[in-house]
Amino acid sequence: MFDNLSDKLDKALHVLKGHGSITEVNVAETLKEVRRALLDADVNFKIAKEFTNTVKEKALGQNVLTTLQPGQLMVKLVKDELTQLMGGEAVGMNLQGSPSVILMSGLQGSGKTTFSGKLANFLKTKKSKKPLLVACDIYRPAAINQLQVVGEQIGVEVYAEVGNTDPVAISKNAISHAKANGHNVVIVDTAGRLAVDEAMMTEIANVHKAITPDETLFVVDSMTGQDAVNTAKAFNDRLNFDGVILTKLDGDTRGGAALSIRTVVEKPIKFIGTGEKMDAIDVFYPSRMADRILGMGDVVSLVERAQDQFDEEEARKLQKKIAKNQFGFDDFMKQIQQVKKMGSMKDLVGMIPGAGKALKDVDIDDDAFKGIEAIINSMTLEERTQPAVINGSRKKRIAKGSGTSVQEVNQLLKQFDQMSKMMKMMQGGGGRKMMQMMGK
Ligand code: GDP
């Protein structure tokens, strides 16, 4: 996510970070590099210029040169400005209507249908809503089909009228259907074209007028360059939309154009899409994203994701087991599965302060656990609960069964042993202290 920008900003700020004392010359030099990094990431020229001018003014105003840690202060100023560029505070959605109506707009291929599904899933699982998805792409039968597949996957009803070619009528009927069937959110997925054209704009403007949505969202593929800004402008001129959705941020995107949208149309980015799966959706927090771009990690999101997976009952059972020295490989396996549910490894590592940068060239494989799981799967129940019984011949059998080597089995046993010891230690108050340190 914004890897390139992140990299270049890090290089630009590196000089200052290391210096005990800095001069006006290297502040100017650094800001020039910062501007170059923004331009390289496709941030609009004017915005990049304003960005560095503001940082410079603030730096001079705060007398950066005379502070104790000028480098740190500069990093903070850049971080604050980056947060501003991305919108300052996070802005939620208006879900007041009954039902609340959400209209999706954007070009074909931007990720509208996928995002409609993700949003429905998010509202259903996180906000206890009962959404209805509406297929309004009357030109491509495949689009209706695609939405139906998505709906089935997440267990959300899809409203479609095959053969009806009037999106205004379909969306109105859908809202009546929602009211009659207790749906409290209606998400209308519309037809997109490959480029902005008058017919499409008129069509979506008509739907917009007819259903007066509580939220009109503009979906944009963050891989598109400066065109994204023009497209956003065109849609905003017609729809005066409420928020922007940046999709495909998981890819190798420069992303700067998408960031410029916020300033150009003055509308907040509300969500980001980070993958093709239905749970690859995140609420957009400008400050957390700025932290991530500057390699400061995003501990808050990491803890939130962990909390999402956290099962108090299970945790209590586990604690008891650890206390009694009964933590076994089965429990270990459960832990691995929980971590896997939190997201891709690369994504998780990116949230740990410093780790994302340090490990950016390391190929973090989501299959990293595969070998471990195979080894554990090849153990008998006795071996899983009492690893001490695993002797030489058992190791050979386990290695053979899991398609690994005795060394790998040994390594896992050793790691497991160390981990068990550490867990035991953390039980003695250390764990609580650690959580306190993390502000929990
Ligand atoms: P629509 O034409 O605007 O409805 O776009 P689709 O929802 O059909 O998405 C177009 C393509 O982009 C599909 O192949 C999706 O799987 C893919 N896609 C959508 N969102 C994301 C995302 O956040 N990350 C990635 N990697 N792919 C996405």
Image: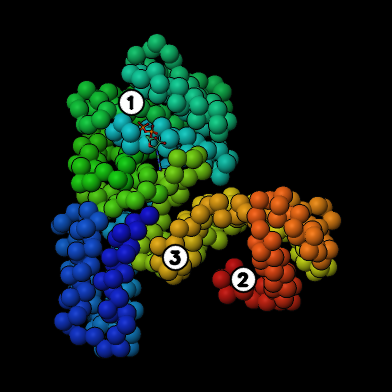
297 sits left or right of 417 in the view: left
Q: Which mark is residue 191?
A: 1
- Compare marks 1 and 3 and give the one earlier in the sequence: 1
Q: What's the amino acid at mark 3?
A: Leu
Instruction: Name the element at disc 1.
Output: loop
Q: Residue at x 50, y 26 (%)?
A: 149
Residue 421: image location, x then y, percent: 73, 73
379 sits left or right of 108 in the view: right
Q: Which mark is residue 261?
A: none
- Marks 1 and 3 sit apart, C-alpha to C-alpha, by 41 Å
Residue 197 visible in the displayed image: yes
340 in relation to 138, above or below: below
64 in relation to 91, above or below: below
Q: Single out the mark in the foreground, 3 or 2.
A: 3
- Compare marks 3 and 2 and give the one earlier in the sequence: 3
Q: What's the amino acid at mark 1?
A: Ala
Residue 349: image location, x then y, percent: 49, 61
Q: Residues within 10 Å of mark 1 (few under 14, many from 20)?
A: many
- Compare marks 1 and 2 and give the one earlier in the sequence: 1
The front one of 146 and 340 is 340
From the image, which quarter does the C terminus lie in? Answer: bottom right
Mark 3 lies on residue: 359
Q: What's the amino acid at mark 2?
A: Met
**Mark 3–mark 2 contact, CB under 8 Å?**
no
Q: Residue at x 33, y 63 (%)?
A: 6
- Marks 1 and 2 sit apart, C-alpha to C-alpha, by 48 Å
Mark 2 lies on residue: 435
Residue 398: image location, x then y, percent: 74, 54
* Residue with the most extreme top position: 163
Instruction: Name the element at disc 3.
Output: loop
- Marks 3 and 2 sit apart, C-alpha to C-alpha, by 25 Å
From the image, which quarter does the N terminus lie in? Answer: bottom left
